[in-house]
Image (tube, rainbow, N blue to C red):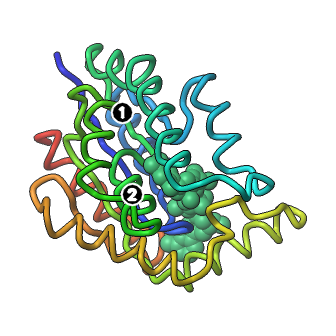
Amino acid sequence: MKGIFITFEGPDGAGKTTQIKMLGLSLEQLNKSVVYTREPGGTSISEEIRGLLLDPRNKEMVARTEALLYAAARAQHVEEVIRPAIEKGQIVLCDRYTDSTIAYQGFGRGIDIGFLNELNAMAVAGVVPDLTLIFDLDPDIGIGRINEKRIVAAGEEKDRIEQENMEFHRKVRQGFRDLALSEPQRCKIINAGRDPETIHSEVVRLVKEVLGL
Ligand code: T5A
């Protein structure tokens, strides 16, 4: 039996990780086999690439290097984790995927979207999400949440992307909104400004539809 592949997208601090955990618990209570993973990351090679991408000391990184590194991490992640899990019939919950490349490197950095679509296609080699949940949130609120999270984590520094200016984060948000409009069948937009339980109920409803439950 083929599994299901669900991706979680949205601007920084939109609450994706929180919702993935909540959804995973609900699915496990239904005796589903769930795989939790994230991008950039998910394999040891991809986690090393993540380190390079998010290290705030790598200020000289140019946009093309950034785009190629995200794609490289993705190619490895697809073959080592995502494709095998889908083939085993598992439910894969992935924190970010191809749409983040379009929103951040395309809308945010200004790299040609057509080129990024081709790069994504090469990286994923046919592994496309069955459902993409786009958590939409004003970046002022999202970055505010990140600032708070870092304070709680004893002054931990924000990563290289989180440190971008608000204009960048606004373009990223617009990118996700445009993506949701252009692929309404796959992408469902969720108002991420509400309390976690309310958002979770909507997530469960959308996921159950895809699972045919
Ligand atoms: N990127 C990634 C690219 O540029 N291109 C790409 O192709 C890819 C794949 C990854 C960075 O890389 C970029 C995007 C990112 O900038 P990351 O650390 O994985 O870095 O970043 P995020 O995925 O954005 O993770 P965050 O932790 O920053 O955000 P989340 O997961 O959306 O949010 P979450 O759940 O951790 O919540 C953040 C805080 O808000 C609270 C939580 O308790 C937490 O403190 N919170 C809420 N508060 C109020 N109401 C709610 N509903 C809340 N939900 C959570």
Where is residue 125, by image quadrant? top left
Does the beta carbon of the residue at mark 1 sit less than 8 Å from ligand 1?
no
In front: mark 1 or mark 2?
Answer: 2
What residue lies at 53% left-to-right and 39% top-to-bottom? Answer: 69
Where does residue 199 sit, x and y in percent of width and height? 38, 68
Q: Does residue 146 appear left or right of residue 210 in this picture? A: right
113 and 96: which is toward the camera: 113
Name the quarter showing ligand 1.
Answer: bottom right
Asked whether the viewer can see residue 17, the reply is no
110 and 158: which is toward the camera: 110
- SS for tag 1? strand
> Where the C terminus falls, by quadrant?
top left
Q: Which residue is mark 2?
A: 9
**Please, is residue 122 above or below residue 160 in the view?**
above
What residue lies at 16% left-to-right and 52% top-to-bottom? Answer: 186
Q: Does residue 87 appear left or right of residue 82 in this picture? A: left
- SS for tag 2? strand
Where does residue 156 sit, x and y in percent of width and height? 84, 61
186 and 70: which is toward the camera: 70
**Please, is residue 157 above or below residue 54 in the view?**
below
